[in-house]
Amino acid sequence: MPIPPEGRFTGELEMLPEDLPDNPFPIFQGWFNHAVAGGVQPNPNAMYLSTVDADGTPSTRTVLCKLIRPDPGAIVFYTNYESRKGLAIEANPVVSVLFHWDAMEKQVRMEGPAVRSPAAESDAYYASRRWESRVGAWASAQSQPIESHDALMLKVFDTVEKLGLDAAALVKDGPDAQVEIPRPPFWGGYRVYPRTMELWCASETRLHDRARWTRELVANGDGFDCGPWSATRLQP
Ligand SMILES: Cc1cc2nc3c(=O)[nH]c(=O)nc-3n(C[C@H](O)[C@H](O)[C@H](O)COP(=O)(O)O)c2cc1C
């Protein structure tokens, strides 16, 4: 399928600079911002998240990157802490993340530990979501079996009732209905602190460009103190 010209990445960040910068985050953030602002694909903030289960089995799924914290350098996604990925992270906190913006011919890889976001950060994001998503977070025991989609819908209705919400008002006001719903204790954010980050971009010569940055992380109780990055150009 041809790539629409408007979806292609052009601009000063086309290739990695010859002198690699000390910190890869501004380049990553620039590519991410371009992907989001340019709408280069339906979910430009999508990332593939790989975890390793307690028994050593790897698994990968798509999640959405909802926040980039450039200092000290962490990215945030939201999920159910009791899902398969949540349980895997509890057992093995080190995860791998991959962004691929096909139309931009760019790829970003990261590896590092994931830790739960502070409650206030998760509360703020949860409160910003539409009520259907907030009810869904309560209703779906993510990754657990269920007999049918109808049974899931019944769980949603049941959840609306248990939360004491006015179902008729929700239906009348639709997605814009304004209601207060507390955040489920089993749902929230993870901050991924990359210990390594690799940036890859295609070149018209097909001699693609690739570099990896690494840094030390020292746990500090609720996150990590992050050492300086060191950069290495890699053969593609
Ligand atoms: C485009 C896209 C975005 C998604 N975003 C999220 C997300 O932000 N959080 C989430 O928990 N699941 C998200 N999902 C669903 C996950 O891919 C996955 O099915 C779900 O989290 C259960 O994964 P697990 O059983 O490995 O924990 C998304 C799926 C797609 C296709």
Image (cartoon, helix red, strand yellow):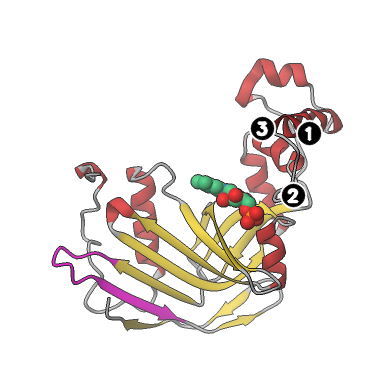
Per the image, the residue denoted by label 1 is 155
Find the residue positioned furthest to the left: 205
On the picture, is 32 further left or further right than 131? left
* Total marks placed: 3
Which quadrant is the C terminus positioned in? bottom left
Q: Residue at x 39, y 65 (%)?
A: 108
Per the image, the residue denoted by label 2 is 144
Judged by depth in the image, the label closer to the viewer, 1 or 2, is 2
Q: Quadrant of residue 223?
A: bottom right
The tag earlier along the polypeptide, 3 or 1, is: 3
Q: Residue at x 61, y 76 (%)?
A: 224
Residue 206: within the magenta?
Answer: yes
Q: CA distance from mark 3 to mark 2?
A: 20 Å
Q: Residue at x 23, y 70 (%)?
A: 208
- For mark 3, does the 10 Å Cα neighbourhood hold few (<14), some (14 to 19), or many (20 or more) residues? some
Residue 147: give x, y in percent of width and height.
75, 38
Which quadrant is the N terminus positioned in? top left
Q: Quadrant of residue 175?
A: top right
Q: CA distance from mark 1 to mark 2?
A: 13 Å
Residue type pointed to by label 1: Lys
Residue type pointed to by label 2: Gln
Q: CA distance from mark 3 to mark 1?
A: 13 Å
* Camera-nearest residue between 194 and 210: 210
On the picture, is 155 further left or further right than 24? right
Q: Secondary structure at mark 2?
A: loop
Q: Which mark is residue 132?
A: 3
The tag earlier along the polypeptide, 1 or 2, is: 2
